Amino acid sequence: MQKPLTELLKEYDLPIGMFPRDATNYEFNEETGKLVVYIPQVCEVGYRDSSVLRFSTSVSGYLEKGKLAEIEGIKTKVLIWVKVTTISSEGPKLHFMAGMKKTRKREAYEVTRDGINVDKF
């Protein structure tokens, strides 16, 4: 029986609200650090700091302490939708690499939120 996704994220020093609330199924290979999170449908999640992330039905990346790298399946809106490649944690800050580095307050991602259905990723 695997632990809840929120517990896994806590263990790796990442905020539990990084993924939509209904993203509960995942596969994690401890040897390689490969994480795949399954989301029931393509959706957007708005956070307390007014940022928005768009999620595909499958998000993958490599999990290490304070960081999810080589991400596939997450976009963020800067002026246009940009693919997120790395999310790293540093104290009260979360750093999003999406063609450029964008820093946001970590506290905005500490609560799980529902995703809003969208037509496409």
Image (spheres, rainbow, N blue to C red):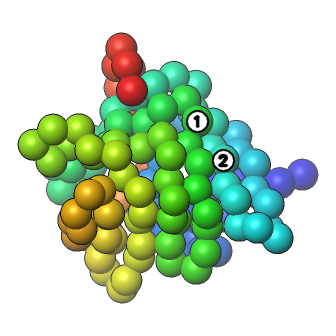
- Residue 48 in the image: state x and y as whole percent: 22, 53
Callout 2 amino acid: Val
Task: Check contact, mark 2 vs mark 1: CB within 8 A.
Answer: yes
The kind of residue tagged 1 is Ser
Seen in the image, is 51 located left or right of residue 37? left
**Can residue 120 be seen here?**
yes
Horizontal side, residue 24 vs residue 84: left or right = right
Q: In this view, does 7 lie to the left or right of 73?
A: right
* Residue under label 2: 36
Percent position (x, y) of residue 13?
53, 76
* Residue at the farthest right position: 1
Q: Is residue 9 above or below residue 51?
A: below
In the image, farthest residue toward the left: 79
Quarter holding residue 81: top left
On screen, residue 47 above or below 14: above
Which residue is found at the position 52% from the left and 65% from the top?
A: 68
Q: In the image, which disc is placed on residue 34?
A: none
Q: Is residue 111 visible?
A: no
Q: Nearer the viewer, residue 32 or 111?
A: 32
Residue at numbered disc 1: 58
Residue at image position (70%, 45%) is 26
Badge 1 element: strand
Q: Is 77 situated left or right of 2 in this image?
A: left
Sequence-wise, the earlier of marks 2 and 1 is 2
The relative height of residue 115 versus residue 82 in the rendered view (above or below) is above
Examine the rendered structure and indicate whether residue 62 appears above or below residue 36. below
Give the quadrant of the C terminus.
top left
Q: Distance between the residues labelled 2 and 1?
A: 7 Å
